[in-house]
Image (cartoon, coloured by chain):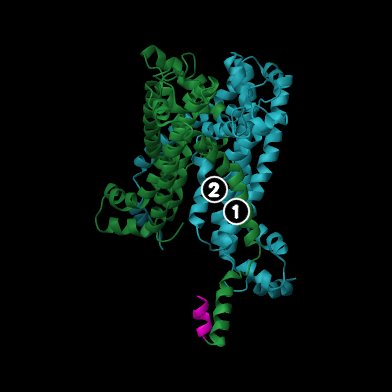
Chain colours: A cyan, B green
Amino acid sequence: MSAPTLGRAEAGTSEPAWVRRILIGLALGFVFLFLLLPLAAVFTEALRKGLPAALEALHEPDAWSAIRLTLITAAVAVPLNLVFGVAAAWAVAKYEFRGKAFLTTLIDLPFSVSPVVAGLIYVLMFGAQGWLGPWLAAHDIKIVFAVPGIILATIFVTFPFIARELIPLMQAQGTDEEQAAIVLGASGWQTFWFVTLPNIRWGLIYGVILCNARAMGEFGAVSVVSGHIRGETNTLPLHVEILYNEYQSVAAFAVASLLTLLALLTLLIKSVVEWQFERDQKAAASLPPERPSADALPTARTAG
Amino acid sequence: MTSAILSTTPATVLSLNTASRRPARRVLPGFNLTLGYTLFYLGLIVLIPLSALLFKTFTLSWDQFWLAVTSPRVLASYRLTFGASFLAALVNVVAGLLLAWVLVRYQFPGKKIIDALVDLPFALPTAVAGISLTALLAGNGWIGQYLEPHGIQLAFNRNGVVIALIFIGLPFVVRTVQPVLEDAEKELEEAATCLGASRFQTFRYVIFPTIAPALLTGFAMAFARAIGEYGSVIFIAGNMPMVSEITPLIIIGKLEQYDYAGATAVATVMLAISFVLLLVINALQSWQRSRSGGKS
């Protein structure tokens, strides 16, 4: 296609330059106001009294115990939801069975339940007046207003993250490769490790990253079941709230900037994964359709 | 049943048996294991605790339940939660469409960074978003200091609720519309132009119908998320009863007063609403899939 025709076709499917500039300007303005300014405000408020004051807030014993509890919570919740996500995606994507649509709706349910309601249901289960409350009290087990409750509530709110990423991915890939592996004599586990897992690795990382971000940052659900005992049942977001309500603004924003850095890191890894995934897809699409590796090998050998 | 089998010849019985056994055998192993574990974990984490909420609700009498969910303070919180969520989701539709359009159709420096940054509200803990927006909009904040002298207050009232909810719901519309715009066929737009349509007419009659289902899905998702949102709102709302108190905060307030019955009743109403919204979103998504011709 020659340059002038290209130009005319472009003119038909794009806007005049001034419209384009206004739209880009409006979009950038919105991003600046709603995303960049809040981001900048966190760090500015944290550094209001200088870096030492901000770092001091992170050295406090209460802050340390909050960091520890947040890490423990994510370390339990994310692997559990990972195993569930893989199992659920395998069941939903590789087989046909009745009630599949209903099952996927149920898996999505925790996304649309308010975090406060999510916390409440565990209080109703395990709290002093709950279903299992008397039995738990008799055996001296504390779940609500203790660490197990926080972990349970976190598992609930991050429940669908990994399954949701994997189900559409595995559905799109179909079962041909796995069936070939089974026919060639691989066991179920071998098929999963060597055939399925490499195919879904980017989706898996993507889901784990988002799940982890939410697990470390969850506020509403955890706030209901935590009981707010300083140094014991405070996660990082709850610690931010306490400091903020005590008018320790610098300390609150210092802890908040730690969580903000985590969010930025999450976005970075997520973008890298997306770019890798796109590159893999393009590479797969540019391969010749039939038996690509068999064709590629002899030429490589003669070249070498 | 037995007589029917006895009356047939042995050969047909045999073929019937194998035919009925065949579909049950699946080539890939692990169906029972994975589905069994999925149902077990789903039951343990989601279904049993949620049923605890419903059973607790059934222990209330109808009058108790009705009184708890229709007291003036709770009604005021519904109005605020739904009104603010609706407004925020509307703003999200406009801003989300603009952002998706600019990110898909135009080239400009820093595009990849903006694209990555759109997901910030998903990644940033809601409490951090809450205190940060409050710091910006309070009377001494970067934005608030210019608005306060003109009598515009954005923090510690209903305006703050809407702004926090706009922030929280921003990625939904962008991320639902973006892939649809990327897949949209440019040939249709070229045809429209060739047939003499202005650029605005092409957008109105060719592009908009294609992305309308995605816009609606994004709206519903942002709305559903906004209704349940707690962390970012409570810092900026001021939380005045009857004025700027959202429904999730009502539940927390009742819990703190050990009014478990009241908290449960209001929570059941919220749960019912979120379940209805979930079904609406599912229906919208399947409509969107059928619109785009089987493509996801």
Q: Residues within 10 Å of mark 1 (few under 14, many from 20)?
A: many
Q: Residue at x 40, y 40 (%)?
A: B98
> Does the magenta segment cover residue A180?
no
Which of the two labelled residues, at mark 1 and mark 2, occupies the earlier sequence position?
A: 1
Q: Chain of mark 2?
A: A
Q: Residue at x 61, y 19 (%)?
A: A242
Range covered by the magenta-colored residues: B1-8
Amino acid on which disc 1 is placed: Ala
On the question of residue B227 being in view, the answer is: yes
In percent of width and height, residue A184 lies at 70, 73
In percent of width and height, residue A105 lies at 49, 49
The residue carrying mark 2 is A107
In percent of width and height, residue B79 lies at 36, 27
In percent of width and height, residue B190 lies at 33, 57
The residue carrying mark 1 is A88
Asked whether the beta carbons under mark 1 and mark 2 sit within 8 Å of each other, the answer is: yes
**Secondary element at image label 2:** helix
Locate residue B128: give its quadrant: top right
